[in-house]
Image (tube, rainbow, N blue to C red):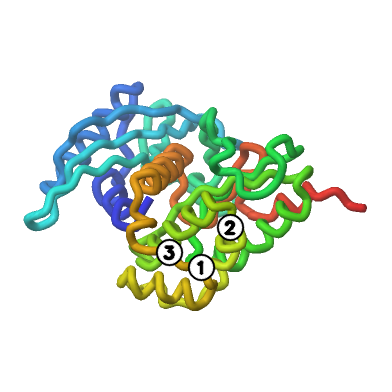
Amino acid sequence: MSSMLRLLSIMTIAGSLAFAGGDGDVINYVKRKLSRNPQVAINDTKIEDKLPIPGIKGWSAYVVALDINLTRGKETRRVKFEDILFVSKDLITSELVDRKTGRDVRSIIQPKMPKDIYNREHLLYGNPNAKHKIVLFSDPLCPFCRMAVPDLMKAAKEHPEDIALYYYHLPLTTLHPASEALVRVMLVAQKEGRKDIVEKMYRIDIDPDLEDEKKILKIVAEKTGYKVTPERIHRSWIDKRLGHDRLTSRKLLVSGTPTVFADGKKDVTREKYKSFIKKK
């Protein structure tokens, strides 16, 4: 979720504890909170999933799908996103912290993996029949991605029978606008089998706040030798692929990058893949 949507989510849903009696109370609670914001008009609100919280008894995590119209000034845009509410027998809250560890419970929620998550279109490195599967959501200009992702790609490339790496693009354009153009270049390169370009994007020296697409493409050409035109990165299939990846990130409650799932479970350490490599 972008920072804007996360802020919207917190502003419109968060609040003091409320009383709950069933699923209907959860929906009514969300609608009541949303209706207090004059910038928001509700199109639809529904419960997508109800998940157990590992190690915490008496509480469940409700994944709520929100479809709203958000007005800012003269502009109105339709926004769809998911958020989590924590529900016990009698209470609803948007924030829940484990008092023993101090950890935000959101970080341990495990959503269900979509059935088509492991598809050849997203397979970057490794054998699809590899023993272990990694799903990665990443942005090439995210500082944390730049530290962690190159090693993960290298491991999957060098150990294809141990690790299959499925790469999902999630450019965080509110934080570094230049990432959108870079990701579009990466998709073109992937389709042409130029995986080396994908790797180079994590090393490219570019101002993350740069928004001039032509300048970005010129820098890419100078730094990597890979030349593409603005027309090539704005094909309909690229728009569709980015839309699919963003939708998948929402279903899996991905709110930042890099987010890693190892064999279907969220890996907060981002290093579980190291244990998958067979020692010789």
Between marks 2 and 1, how big is the CA–CA gap? Answer: 9 Å
The crowding category of the residue bearing disc 2, from other C-alpha atoms within 10 Å (few below 14, some 14 to 19, many at least 20), is some
Q: In the rendered view, tell whether residue 47 sits above or below residue 41.
A: above
Label 1: how many Cα within 10 Å (few below 14, some 14–19, many 20+): some
Q: Residue at x 76, y 54 (%)?
A: 274
Q: CA distance from mark 1 to mark 3?
A: 7 Å
First of labels 2, 1 by sequence position = 2
Nearer-N-terminus badge (3/2): 2
Where disc 1 sits, the SS reads: loop
Q: Residue at x 75, y 47 (%)?
A: 160
SS for dot 3: loop
Q: Residue at x 51, y 45 (%)?
A: 105
Q: Residue at the location (20% across, 35% down)?
A: 32
Q: Amino acid at mark 1?
A: Tyr
Residue 5 image position (x, y, % from top left)? 30, 51
Amino acid type for the residue under numbered disc 3: Val
At which x and y percent is residue 236? 34, 45
Is 182 or 76 nearer to us in this picture? 182
Q: Amino acid at mark 2?
A: Arg
In the image shown, does 86 or 267 lie closer to the viewer?
267
Judged left or right of residue 172, residue 120 is right
- CB atoms at circles 3 and 2 under 8 Å apart? no
The percent position of residue 237, horizontal first and vertical second, equals 39, 44
Residue, disc 1: 226
Q: Is residue 206 above or below residue 182?
A: below
Seen from the viewer's position, the closer of residues 217 and 28 is 217
Mark 2, residue position: 194
Mark identifier at residue 228: 3
* Left or right of 117 in this view: 227: left
Determine the CA span between mark 3 and mark 2: 13 Å
